[in-house]
Amino acid sequence: MRNKNTKTKEFRELTYEISLMLGYEAMRNLDTVMTEIETPLVKDIFPLVEARNIALVPILRAGLAMSDAISDLMPTARIGHIGMYRDPITHKAVEYFCKLPSEIQNCNVFMLDPMLATGSSAIAAINLIKEKGVQNITFVSILSAPEGIKALNTAHPDVIVYTACVDKYLNADHYIIPGLGDAGDRIFGTM
C-alpha cells in the first residue's frame, strides 16, 4: 500500500484485505447470546454473536473501502455514514454529512477510517455519535500516527482503537510519515 506506484485497483484490494483482518480482531470480543441450534445430529446450545446490535460507521469517503470488508464479516450489521473533511488551513475536521441507523444508541459501533493522523476527524465523528447516546465505540484504522492515537485517547479514553500500523510522526502539514499518501485519493483514483 505504501508504494507510490501501487495502482488504484491493487490499493483497494489491499485495503479490503487489511480491513478484513482488522475487523476480525476488533470484533473478537463481541458479546454472544446462547442460542439453541439443531445440527444434523442433535440440538444443542451455542454462542452466537448478536449481529443486529452492530453498526459500522465509516468516515467518508475513505472509510467506505473498509466498510465493504467488515460488512462481509457481519452482513447483518447496520451501516451509517459520517462525512468529514480536513480544513486545509486549520487542519480541523468539518462535518458535511451524517446519516446514522435508528436506535444506534443500542449498538456496538465500529467507526472506520483508514488513516488516523491528527485525530481531529475521529474525535469529531465520535462526538457526533456519542451525542446520539452511543456508549460502545471501537475505532478501526489501517495506519495511525502516534499524535492521532494520543489525541483520540485523551478525548475519548473509553474508545478502543485497532490499527494495523503506527507510523513515526506527523509532518508540518499533518500528514503521516512515512505514510502512504492520501488514502481516499488512492482508493478512488482521484490523485
Image: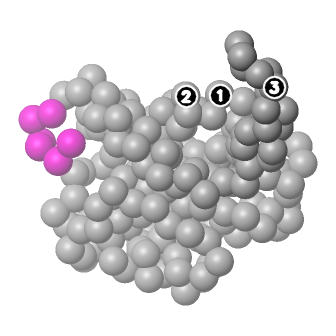
Of the two numbered discs 2 and 3 on the same chain, state the one appearing first in sequence: 3
Which residue is labeled 3 in the image?
A: 43
On screen, residue 45 versus residue 15, left or right, reads right
Under mark 2, the amino acid is Asp
Residue 169, position as x, y percentages in the image: 24, 76
Q: Position of residue 30 (x, y in %)?
A: 66, 54
Q: Which residue is mark 1?
A: 75
Q: Nearer the viewer, mark 3 or mark 1?
A: 3
Q: Secondary structure at mark 3?
A: strand
Range of residues picked out in magenta? 1-6
The residue identified by callout 2 is: 72
159, above or below 48, in the image? below
Query: Residue 104: horizontal and vertical position, in percent?
Result: 83, 51
Q: Residue at x 17, y 47 (%)?
A: 2
Q: Quadrant of the C terminus?
A: top left
* Left or right relative to 66: residue 74: right
Residue at 72 percent of width and 43 percent of height: 47
User: Which secondary structure, mark 1?
Assistant: loop
Pick whichever of labels 3 and 1 is earlier in the sequence: 3
| Cβ–Cβ under 8 Å for marks 2 and 1 | yes
